[in-house]
Image (cartoon, rainbow, N blue to C red):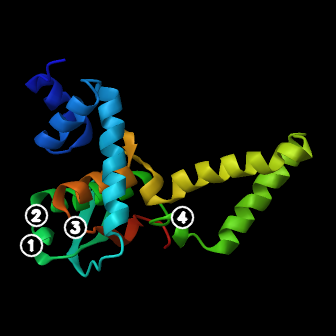
Amino acid sequence: MTITPALVKELRDKTGCGMMDCKRALEETKGDVKVAVDLLRKKGLADLAKRASRAANEGIVDAYIHGGGRIAVLVEVNCETDFVARNEDFRQFTHDVAMQIAATSPMFVSRDDVPDELKEAERDIYRAQGLQEGKPENIIDKIIDGRMEKFYQTVCLLEQTFVKNPDITIQDQLGVLVSRIGENVSIKRFIRYQLGEEL
């Protein structure tokens, strides 16, 4: 199959990856855009895992204000070098993350940040709900695990669906960025203020 520029553009629009990466992925998947999207996401996550141990001591803090000043977000995203901290893709990702936080109000960056007490409290609630719904004891643990996954997708920023592209998560988008710039990138911390809300 011939890989047309229109096909490359379609894949690039869906993933945000570079043109040559998109072209190679399409060649490898014989022009199947859906499979190419998955391939690029896996590559991004593999690059992310490979670079995760490298120190990320540079970066930026970005601010996003939404709703006429009703919601404000500060987010710190780190990278390895000040050169990347000035990179347009890195800055755009940081701003997109701030927008994501404003829109979805996560509580934590990742599931590793969720306190054990909160995890246990959620599991207890889901167990009580399962028993109240009359679910058999032998499947309640599977139900709890499924509901915990949904809980993490709600409260953990990295596991949320990306508001600018519902086909991927923030973790996937981070993987794309790491693959593109070749450095470890991590979302360090954030704070979200909403008018009238207690912290």
Residue 87 badge: 2
Q: Mark 1 points at which residue?
A: 83
CB under 8 Å between callouts 1 and 2?
A: yes
Q: In the rendered view, does 159 fall on the left or right side of 79? A: right
User: Mark 1 Cα within 10 Å, few/some/many (few <14, many 20+)?
Assistant: few
Q: Which of marks 4 and 3 is in front?
A: 3
Picture quarter containing residue 186?
A: bottom left
Residue wearing tag 4:
111
- Of label 1 and label 4, which has the lower sequence position? 1
Residue 4, above or below 161: above
Left or right: 57 as drawn, with respect to 20: right
Q: Is residue 49 above or below residue 128?
A: below
Disc 2, disc 4: CB below 8 Å?
Answer: no
Q: Label for residue 183?
A: 3
144 or 75, which is in the foreground?
A: 144
Mark 2 nearby-residue class (10 Å; few <14, some 14–19, many ≥20): few
Residue type highlighted by circle 2? Asn
- Which residue is drawn at the image coordinates 40% and 64% (left, top)? 195
x 44%, y 59%: residue: 157
- Label 1 – label 4 distance at C-alpha: 30 Å
